[in-house]
Image (cartoon, rainbow, N blue to C red):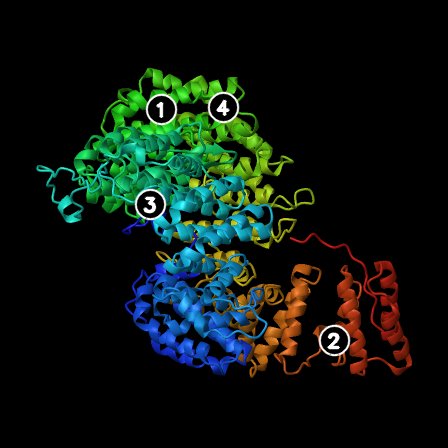
Amino acid sequence: MALSEEPAAGAAEDPAEDPVEDAAEDAALACGAALESFGESAETRELLGRLPVVLADRSAREGALERFRVIMDKYQEQPHLLDPHLEWMLNLLLEFVQNKASPADLVHLAFKFLYIISKVRGYKTFLRLFPHEVADVHPVLDMFTNQNPKDHETWETRYMLLLWLSVTCLIPFDFSRLDGNLLSQPGQERVSTMDRILQVAESYLVVSDKARDAAAVLVSKFVTRPDVKQKKMASFLDWSLCTLARSSFQTIEGVIAMDGTLQALAQIFKHGKREDCLPYAATVLQCLDSCRLPDSNQTLLRKLGVKLVQRLGLTFLKPRVAGWRYQRGCRSLAESLQHSIQNPKEPMTQAETPDSDGEDDVPAEVESVIEQLLVGLKDKDTIVRWSAAKGIGRMAGRLPKELADDVTGSVLDCFSFQETDSAWHGGCLALAELGRRGLLLPSRLSDVVPVILKALTYEEKRGACSVGSNVRDAACYVCWAFARAYEPQELKPFVAAISSALVIATVFDRDVNCRRAASAAFQENVGRQGTFPHGIDILTTADYFAVGNRSNCFLVISMFIAGFPEYTQPMIEHLVTMKINHWDGTIRELSAKALRNLAQRAPEHTACEVFPRLLSMTQSPDLHTRHGAVLACAEVARSLRTLAAQQGRPVSDFLDEKAMHGLKQIHQQLYDRQLYRGLGGELMRQAVCILIENLALSKMPFRGDAVIDGWQWLINDTLRNLHLISSHSRQHIKEAAVSALAALCSEYHAREPGEAEAAAQEELVKLYLAELQSPEEMTRCGCALALGALPAFFLKGRLRQVLTGLRAVTHISSKDVSFAEARRDALKAISRICQTVGVRAEGPPDEALCRENVSQIYCTLLDCLKDYTTDSRGDVGAWVREAAMTSLMDLTLLLGRNQPELIEAPLCQRLMCCLAQQASEKIDRFRAHAARVFLALLHADSPAIPHVPARPELERLFPRAAVASVNWGAPSQAFPCMARLLGLPAYRYHVLLGLAVSVGGLTESTVRYSTQGLFEHMKEIQNDPAALEDFGGTLLQVFEDNLLNDRVSVPLLKTLDQMLANGCFDVFTTQEEFCGLVQFPGDVRKKALLQLFLLLCHPFPVIRKHTASQVYEMVLTYDVVPAAVLDEVMAVLSSTAWDAELPVVRTQRNHLCDLLGVPRPQLVPKPAIR
């Protein structure tokens, strides 16, 4: 709910009348309604003046229209800024319309511009400026003769003409006076102006475009004229009722006809005089009942039906101000803030119209109207409920006090838990309407406030989601309306309950809209009532923007508000009652963490009242309640233990023996009831692992207890059976189990500080090492991370054995080539172990990183940078490479800080070159990560990393200040920087290898910017033969090393093709790849032909066909084939089906080799590609 003068729910009289385009609204909100004037006046004047010029050019015409639309849309939020300019814009456009010589297309274009203006400013304001003299009636009416209602390209013309005609109908002269000027042709019947207008209106009430809305406006203005109502109102109403009777909402045509007719009737009964409409109201109501609109699935028809019903009800009742209504005496916000409650003003009431006539003046039809409106409150669509709520408020304002109170009672019946969320929402809207109109008397507040408090927390689970956010938002609107409607003393008995409920909704509601609505309602109450405890302090922290972040609300803002004792216990109670058992797992986790924080504010209450309830909830049959309770027990127990330690008190002051026993029993009770199985078991495993971690970190006195073995069994069983857990929750459970294992071993498997229990150490290390060879990938992942999480004293004497086991997981074999996640987690484990055991240069290799094992670890990590495994998920090897880069950075920085002499020059050179290669490749995310690691090592200081190749040149190419702002994930910024490394011999090979894959890739931006970076370097060395020779040699070396690697060789061929085509080697021609090299005799030609013939037997048929085509063109272009065999070579190339089976193709290829004197390629086993 916005902090505006009116809430979002009531911002418009009719939510469906003037829709605003989302983009324009966002743009206007972005500038904060900060425009001061119409700044595009000159541009607009010039744009409108050029319409005749741009008319002939369709592109220019559409451009002008779009530009004008963009200009106008800026003022959607501040349309009043257009008011001083509306008249001249209208006059410019009407000149084209009223000019008889204007072509039809120009007239239609002018009306399109007029419609855009009316859409932004609103037709009610804009129409006042249209010419509406007597002389304008017939010209406007005559324009309809040239209109085609079925032309959907010109609907704006008909829409604006109908609105223009509606304003000309307001002339204060009888229309019969205009008929004398009409000339009748011989044999034609004379048609009066009145009949012509009515015919136009009726014809456009049943069209399918927006002209239907304008026709309804025209009817309301025309039929309610004094001269027309006497002659035409009855006949028009007959026509309308007949149209409704013969139309069906089951067909599109029927829906359109009923829509226009209902709009017209609603407008007539809204704008017409009561005494004129009253004779027809009962008949219209009866016809409307027979239409059975509530049964329609068309939202707009049901909304119009409710709108018409309430207008009929208001027609039945005399207009009057209810003398019994409540009026707040003072609405000054400043006075409310002055705390002048010592002498409160008595509520003022008005008695302009006495209620002495009582119920006798209420027609019987009113009961039917009220009943239909109450049904509308329960409609499934919001706009119908909102219209019904406004109708309830309007009707109650004209009813006697007793009947209005009965209506209020009927509205309160919507708040039964047997009703749907729609009924609750409609009831809230109706109560807000009654309250802000003064029709909800203070005596009813004792009935209403408890209902609203329930609505503020209303939520009903439906399948995998819930409903109720609209109910909570509407309940906030009710609180907002009450703040403006009642004197402070009227709401004083309910301040504590309302303030607590709004604070709870502000910080703990799941939906951001509800949190913001509650914040706005709280602010309104603080300003208008001045009685909310600590209101200003809370508003300063929980403002509109602060409550936009859910985690911030649960963990930060709630902690601040809980510092005020009035709100602490209600917030804790709400979390335990409503949020711990919430259907959304994220809310349950946040609620548990919020309870941990709030326990610090009310430790005694939490320990004595809350914690026993949480323990009992852990045995609930409901999965969500059980899961949330276990999480909450974990967090609250740790919080109370921490608080006891801070205060120097024993933990038993907060957690007695019964509570301790309850904590220990959670796992066993869940195990006995077999609640670790199935999908629900996944949640419980994760929750109990978090419980284990928190209890271990809290140093609960459970050492030696049997529960430790049970906890250890749960962790081991979870890690071994990760493959049985659903993929969407597997990662969270794995992380929870690993964290629990680390805490459990540190606290409960230590015989004394720094020394592990020998039996536990032997058992766990042996178990996890054995499971590293499991045929299940997820089991390998879990056990690898478990080894990485073991504390240092658990690895003492076992380090070499553990590293060997993890190193084996990182190797690729034919059986586990797709186990990329296992290799990734093994690398993470190696990195974590290195951080855990620390560095001792001359230390034993079984206890710490030392000179003996550092090089092996480096080689393992660097080898994983060559993992380019792909499967159905894509480049899964990228996960391994990312983990390897992170591990290399952590290891190198660790050595650099402690023992930099252990970083050997060859290893450092290989490390930096491999990182440069990864920073030149095609996947944005991993390229950015590699660049960040590369620069972190380059710019590391205190001390600097030793043996970085070409460090001075690198620091010049990548200065610390300049590269900090580079977005390495953007190809346009990353590739120009990385291509500079081609000038450094130490990095050229690896950077060229990475760039070749990027230049020959598929992504347009990657190809474009990597190519630009490569070509920029080639331009720089064009005049340096030595540099060109070195570059060419490196390029050939890359190709030779990756000849059988399609991941590199295919993109490399594309890269070479582009380089030759763009003249990067001016000694080459523009033919493709090796075909361009055969023109050079000697060894170059022989090698080129050999490579071409290898490609003629490539595994991919498309490459074989393309190569054969290129070789055919080569033979025609260059004189490289002896004349004696030329015809036979051409015949073989053209007649062979190169996409046939390889044995057939290989025979023809070998024949070509023999004809050209090239050695036949020999089949060799293809090595595994990493």
Kind of residue at disc 1: Met
Residue 532 is at least partly visible in this image: yes
The Cα–Cα distance between marks 2 and 1, rounded to whole angstroms, is 76 Å
Q: SS of the residue at dot 2?
A: helix
Kind of residue at disc 3: Arg
Front one among 226 and 19? 226
Give whichever of discs 3 and 4 has the lower sequence position.
3
Where does label 4 land, which residue? 759
The Cα–Cα distance between marks 4 and 1, rounded to whole angstroms, is 22 Å
Q: Are marks 2 and 4 in contact (CB under 8 Å)?
A: no
Q: Are marks 4 and 1 in contact (CB under 8 Å)?
A: no
Residue 946 is at least partly visible in this image: no
Where does label 1 land, which residue? 700
Give whichever of discs 3 and 2 has the lower sequence position.
3
The Cα–Cα distance between marks 3 and 4, rounded to whole angstroms, is 57 Å
| Rendered position, 655 above or below 57 | above
Front one among 211 and 1153? 211
Q: Residue furthest left?
A: 343
The Cα–Cα distance between marks 2 and 4, rounded to whole angstroms, is 70 Å
Few, some or many residues within 10 Å of mark 4 (<14, 14–19, 20+): few
Q: Looking at the picture, how far across and down is residue 92, in whole percent?
A: 39, 78
Where does label 3 land, which residue? 516
Give whichever of discs 3 and 1 has the lower sequence position.
3
Give whichever of discs 4 and 1 has the lower sequence position.
1
- 132 vs 64, left or right, is left
Kind of residue at disc 4: Ala
The Cα–Cα distance between marks 3 and 2, rounded to whole angstroms, is 68 Å
Tally the numbered discs.
Answer: 4
Kind of residue at disc 2: Cys
Depth-wise, is mark 3 or mark 4 nearer the camera?
3
Where does label 2 land, which residue? 1075
